[in-house]
Amino acid sequence: MKTVFSPLHAGHADTMELNSGEIVPGFEKPARAEIIKARVESERLGPILPPEIHDLAAAKKVHTSAYIDFLPTVWPQWEASGRGGSAIPFTWPTRGLRGDVVPDNIDAQLGFYSFDAGAPFVKGTWHAIKSSYDVALTAAALVKAGERTAFALCRPPGHHAGAAFMGGYCYINNAAVVAQWFRDQGAARVSILDVDYHHGNGTQEIFYQRRDVQVLNLHADPMVEYPFFLGHADERGHGEGEGFNHNYPMPFGTAFDEWSAALEDACGKLVAYAPDIVVVSLGVDTFEKDPISQFKLKSPDYPKVGARIAALNLPTLFVMEGGYAVDEIGVNAVGVLTGFEDR
Amino acid sequence: MKTVFSPLHAGHADTMELNSGEIVPGFEKPARAEIIKARVESERLGPILPPEIHDLAAAKKVHTSAYIDFLPTVWPQWEASGRGGSAIPFTWPTRGLRGDVVPDNIDAQLGFYSFDAGAPFVKGTWHAIKSSYDVALTAAALVKAGERTAFALCRPPGHHAGAAFMGGYCYINNAAVVAQWFRDQGAARVSILDVDYHHGNGTQEIFYQRRDVQVLNLHADPMVEYPFFLGHADERGHGEGEGFNHNYPMPFGTAFDEWSAALEDACGKLVAYAPDIVVVSLGVDTFEKDPISQFKLKSPDYPKVGARIAALNLPTLFVMEGGYAVDEIGVNAVGVLTGFEDR
Ligand SMILES: [Zn+2]
Ligand SMILES: [Zn+2]
């Protein structure tokens, strides 16, 4: 299996985030990607390729143009306002406020295009976002060209990013971008299987009214876990998308037995949908030692996840999402991939 | 002029807020109310009365019951989750997210019921909110009983709080509560004149579809200033409320000449509306030395504001809102009141 990776992710470093009423160092940090890359090498998963550079047209197929055009301006605007550290908003247009007028102020723009204080910008953030997008599209092209699978070692992740908002460490929704790209390349149907601990609210939002992209989400119950405001079982799609969105919210403490039963159900729905391609939003924050999560999967469980996905017998693109137990993130993420390869 | 004041505001102290990507001490602090009270005394404005205790029925006429019932639970829930400091949310239900399911998690509930990270809770916050509400209602009763005017020395302020959200140092919208209370006591029409530097987005939202409460707002342009997502000139009310909301957004650097021209226009609309009562949302963060604001009013301007309001010749209740230049907040706030009394 080929892996696509860019060193530019590392410029998105030393970020700060709001948590428990304090500004703390971001759990989403460069070591995550570096440790996964090292494990890809030590496990001899296959060659590691650099990304090809793409323009932003594919991003603008799933995000609004205004949102994508905004992202590269954030750090220059923040610096021009005389500030350093991490650019983080402090106010958001919730119920009763206007979503149709973009303010001139950079703090307001940050809030306008986000749903939390968890998508900080530093100097290297935009280049990391862009490289992550390039990584995803380059890996997608490998699968399009005939590879059975490929691994997009994306950082930052993407599944919390919606059509016009960032949040939860996510800016461009890489999985959504490649799903749309496969459609535009001729795939009739694409399934996105999101196994990250957190609900992929951005992915759901982007495809919620469409039947040509099936979205399956296994995650912690939003009643008790971030992103809180989406991911309930009754969200099944809308309009012609009704019936093509499937959520599997699970309680704190869920271990592999129950989790894999949900995966089995999702795989059944996926097979019934008969997609041409599967995009896996690969988060390994389901791990028992993850510092911000509450599931109980163990390292030996991850190859079984990969094996189950391989049994779908479909072209499959893995897109890296979350996972914050950096000591084991390589073992667990690459464990899924070696399990997929049946070794 | 009688002033109503409660020492319980002081328990809302040592709050922290998110600003420029950092957690900083709140600009909204106990000294604000204490310095105004001292000026009321030194200027011999009149007696200072304690508030009568009220139940929360009047609050639930302008806020949702769920929101009001939530407020006293915040600090106990936050403490039960093992944390101290200031309770501040980190994620909000913006576009594409659900506003119909209240999560169980306290961080999520804080985000569900707010639009920013600027309404922190500490141990004494709920008792301060409740006392501020009692102060407003007690002062309103003085005017109802025949006083020409009264001063509700409220802290925390209220005008950013909407029907179901807090934000911008505001929790219960005291001005909205008393406007509704006057209606329920038989006033046919009430005008709310908001002279705070910031747009009173909560007040606007609460009365936006009603014609029995006129809302007039003088404030910094939301394109460049908090609360950013409401307060444009084209917001004139909706449905039967159309034409009963008036916004006067003004640019950074606005001095008294231009500001008072807007006040004059607002007074014209108020007179045409012919209310039984005027509720003034009295913020003095229009002051040239305010640390978070960009208007240029000077201390001698404030008595002129009071005199202009007095010339309306209507029963008038002053409800304290913002103002963060603590050295001069007493001079400026009480300046409006002595100007109203023509001395
Ligand atoms: Zn996650
Ligand atoms: Zn203000």
Image (spheres, coloured by chain):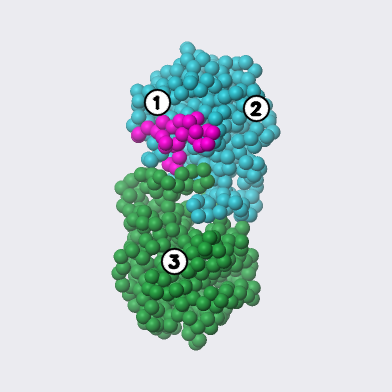
Chain colours: A cyan, B green
Q: Which residue is mark 2?
A: A184
Q: Which residue is mark 1?
A: A262
- Depth check: B327 or B58 in front? B58
Say what secondary structure mark 3 lies in: helix
Q: Residue at x 61, y 30 (%)?
A: A180
| Residue A123 image position (x, y, % from top left) | 61, 42
Q: Residue at x 44, y 24 (%)?
A: A266
- Depth check: A177 or A19 in front? A177
Compared across the picture, whether B78 is left or right of B249 comes to left
The outermost residue toward the front is: B240
Q: CA distance from mark 3 to mark 2?
A: 53 Å
Chain under callout 2: A
Compared across the picture, whether A42 is left or right of B76 comes to right
Question: From this viewpoint, is residue B126 visible?
Answer: yes
Compared across the picture, whether B194 is left or right of A218 comes to right
Q: CA distance from mark 1 to mark 2?
A: 30 Å
Q: Which residue is mark 3?
A: B176
